[in-house]
Image (cartoon, grey):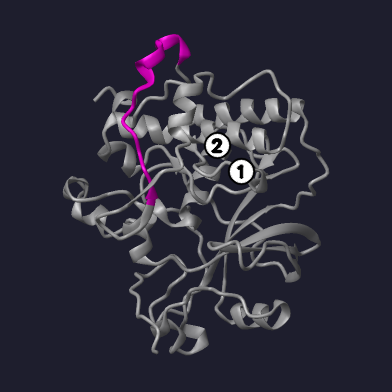
Amino acid sequence: MPSQRRTRRQSPGQQDDNTEDRRYDNPLPPCEGAKLLPFQGRYAPLHFKRLISDPVRDQKSHVFEVTIGSDVYALKVFRFFDDDDAAHDSDLYGSDQEAVPCDTLSHLDHYYAPFYNECRAFGKLIDADQNGKIAVHCHGYMSLPACWEGRLNKQFGKLDWDRLDEDSARPVSKRQDLMAIVKEMLHDNVPWTPKVARKCLKDLRRLRSLGVYPMDIKADNYVGGLLVDLSQAYTKPHLIFRIKPAHWLRMEQERDLADFDQMVEEMGLKTNFRAIVNYKYRYKLRLSTTTESPYYGKTRKKRKRDTRGDEGDDSMVSGDLTEKEDLGR
């Protein structure tokens, strides 16, 4: 059976057929908000040492230990992002899409592609002088010519890159580049203890106060007490904060805190603190009931209306504001 054809727009790593310059010197993403600068050592010799991530479990990227020049880094190389994924993951349905400007709707990947999500989030941390304090130290982004795909597949076995069939049919020199983010190479030598968990919760609250919502808090995304994956993060300013109603945004914003509490519980840590004090509200956020989406046929977590007032304001959580409220709109 032939594979289903998918449509992808030109990504930051895609060049026109007559373009020879494959360098990327501009901050990304190419839209409003925080941006990430190119890695300064991107032209130094690059050697891949080992594959760190699980190629089966990680659906968005592959992470390698590399040497660039004489220094060791963790290099996160992203798989190609499908336009259909942007519409599928954006939670912009029906009237929501009508409220989005046409030029923005045609570039949803700027707000939802995992590569751009990390560029935006790490750019915000760098701007706030928090690089390496809350999440792993980020050194910038870089691109890899398409010829690296074959080299990596030969060295580490067949890796899935989600490259479009039409792009694969081009000469290798004309194919989309792979986009990557250069990070400090961490070793997980910090065991989880109540003290470490408290520090991570403090860091998470600080991150959220900067307008970065990771949306994927779990133990696998921490190394050495630092977040290493922000590929699903919402970072203000973001399209979602201008479109969705306040009650929906509050539920989404607090989901990180509920996930943090669940992570601590699953690790069996005995602590005297919680990210969300209101147990009833935390339970509602973590409902496992699912419902079938009428829009894309996707099984999604069922979202309840915001009912945090059931036990009074003193049992609420962080009280994050929507972007509209932040801007006084």
**Front one among 294 and 69:** 294
Q: Quadrant of the N terminus?
A: bottom left
Give the CA separation, mark 1 to mark 2.
7 Å
Q: Position of residue 231 (x, y in %)?
A: 52, 51
Q: Position of residue 16 (x, y in %)?
A: 38, 78
- Marks 1 & 2, CB-CB < 8 Å contact: yes
Q: Position of residue 104 (x, y in %)?
A: 26, 53
Q: What residue is rendered at 66% in x and 48% in y?
A: 220
Sequence-wise, which precedes: disc 1 or disc 2? Answer: 1
| Residue annotated with mark 2 | 259
**Front one among 158 and 18:** 158
Mark 1 burial class by Cα count in 10 Å: few <14, some 14-19, many 20+: some
Q: Quadrant of the C terminus?
A: top left
Q: Is residue 264 above or below residue 63?
A: above
**Front one among 46 and 276:** 276
Q: What residue is rendered at 35% in x and 80% in y?
A: 5
The count of marks equals: 2
Q: Is residue 44 left or right of residue 6?
A: right
Q: Is residue 260 visible?
A: yes
| Residue annotated with mark 1 | 218
Q: Amino acid at mark 1?
A: Lys
Task: Specify whether residue 35 is painted magenta.
Answer: no
Q: Amino acid at mark 2?
A: Asp
Q: Is residue 30 visible?
A: no
Q: What residue is rendered at 81% in x and 62% in y?
A: 70
Q: Which span of residues is magenta-colored? A: 300-315
Q: Position of residue 215 (x, y in %)?
A: 49, 42
- Outermost residue, front direction? 289
Q: Is residue 190 left or right of residue 98?
A: right
Mark 2 burial class by Cα count in 10 Å: few <14, some 14-19, many 20+: many
